[in-house]
Amino acid sequence: MSWDVIYENLGRYADGAGLTLMLTALALGISFFLSIGLALARNATQPLARGAVFIYTLVFRGTPLLIQLFLIYYGLAQFDLLRQSFLWPWLSSPLICVLIAFVLNTTAYTTEIFAGGLRHLPPGEIEAARAYGMSWWTQVRRILLPAMLTRSLSLYGNEAIMMLHATSLASTVTLMEITGVARNITLNYYIQFEPYVTAALIYLVLTSVLVCGFQLAEKRWGAYLQPRRS
Amino acid sequence: MKTRYRNVVAALAFTLSGAAFAAPITIATDATFPPFESIDANGKLVGYDVELMQAICEEAKLDCNIIAAAWEGMIPGLIARKYDALISQLTVTEARKKTVAFSDVYQIPSFRFVARKDAGLTLTPEGLKGKVIAVQTGTPMDAYITKNYTGSTIKRYSSGSEPYLELRAGRADVHLSYEAQIIHSFTSRDEGKDFELVGPTLTGKDAPEFGEGVAIAVRKANTELVGKINEGLAAVRANGRQAALDAKYFGAE
């Protein structure tokens, strides 16, 4: 066993973990706000809005994230028009391409999670809000959003964990996150077990922190949804 | 009774020892590196290394099964006994010698930089400061660039073909690889018409990272296989089969 190699490279793993956390936080943060709007549109009465969101979620949930990432990173680079546009300084960056792919992908899943949360909202709550004379925006702010988010917490927690694990794909486009560091050590020291076990342990720790965070959030905001103990 | 058991065990041992010699040898190659190794339209492994290995196996009377494998798992896979040998333009370096055994060198590769025709780059560490250099990760090129070009941004790719996509996209300024591979995969094709080989030809004489040449890697303990491969290699040299492959792939006499 060559654990001394891992010890020598712990700094690189720390940098990799930092990048992994940054990618996860940014992707989830941006997609969270996008998903709220899209979830409302997904349950809207206008068929055009509903249909557009449905097609978007179908495409991004129906194709693998790796292919989406390659299409954005390598595919877009084929178009001269795009390469000569003002967008290219951003799109030439692997970090931006990875974020675009991750945000588009996780937003599609989160939209469906939130839309499902909205669909499970008891109609009585909306009727009561209307009876109070609440405007649509007030209903959204005070009734729909809190109910949607609390009902979706456990599923959203799973999506956050999936997103954390999906960041490992960033190494395919040169970003040195946890998996990228492990691969690099494998190639330079000709060992596979130790680098990947170390990477797995780091992911396990980060996942455990996420799980605990979501459990606390469920206790704090979702307690009223739990079945009552007699 | 004991004698009968002893006879059965002896017969089994004899059969198994025979089977061990007859078992096909698994040879791995990273099939993303034409003209040395790649997969053709029919899904067949082709290339200089593949044909050379087939010729070596024929001459050494070895039953060989050449398979495609991921670059990053090749040496660990060899050590873990997933493969018996590796042929994939593996350069003989001091670092690798500590881990695996090598056959005799069968080729001395030359390495070159490739860049856009109008780039006007100075290929010194100072000249490429702040520039983006693309390399295949875990290769001699990676080791050389990492050691010498500390002021540059180094982008590492898992296959030998991805850096060319990056050059075309403008995400990388320069790429270092095997000269023959650059010509075959890029500059001789329409996609690489705006690019050219730049700077001097580099070999193991210029930097230790480039190694002593390319050879076939085998597990350290498997000295018998190294011997057989060397026999086969000597035979393909002597009978002109390697020279014919050189002519076919590189236009060499």
Image (cartoon, helix red, strand yellow):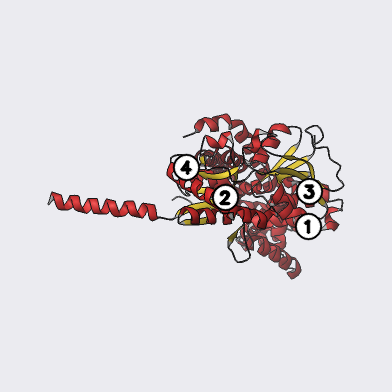
- In the image, what residue type sits under mark 3? Ser
Residue under pointer 2: B237
Chain of the residue displaying label 2: B
Residue A145 position, x and y percent, is: 68, 53
The residue sitting at 65% across, 40% down in the picture is B140
Looking at the rendered structure, whether the residues under marks 1 and 2 are on a common chain is answered as yes
Picture quadrant where residue B137 is located: top right
Residue that extends furthest to the bottom in the rendered view of this protein: A47
Say whether residue B242 is left or right of residue A49: left
Callout 1 environment at 10 Å: few (<14), some (14 to 19), or many (20+)?
A: few
Residue under pointer 1: B191
Question: How much space separates mark 1 and mark 4, taking CA atoms?
Answer: 39 Å
Chain of the residue displaying label 4: B
Picture quadrant where residue B172 is located: top right
- In the image, what residue type sits under mark 1? Glu
**Callout 4 secondary element:** loop
Given this view, does label 1 or label 3 mark the residue nearer the observer?
1
Chain of the residue displaying label 1: B
Question: How much space separates mark 3 and mark 4, taking CA atoms?
Answer: 42 Å
Q: Are marks 1 and 4 in contact (CB under 8 Å)?
A: no
Question: How much space separates mark 2 and mark 3, taking CA atoms?
Answer: 47 Å
Residue A129 position, x and y percent, is: 69, 58
Q: Are marks 2 and 3 in contact (CB under 8 Å)?
A: no
Question: How much space separates mark 1 and mark 3, taking CA atoms?
Answer: 19 Å
Residue under pointer 4: B219
Callout 3 environment at 10 Å: few (<14), some (14 to 19), or many (20+)?
A: many
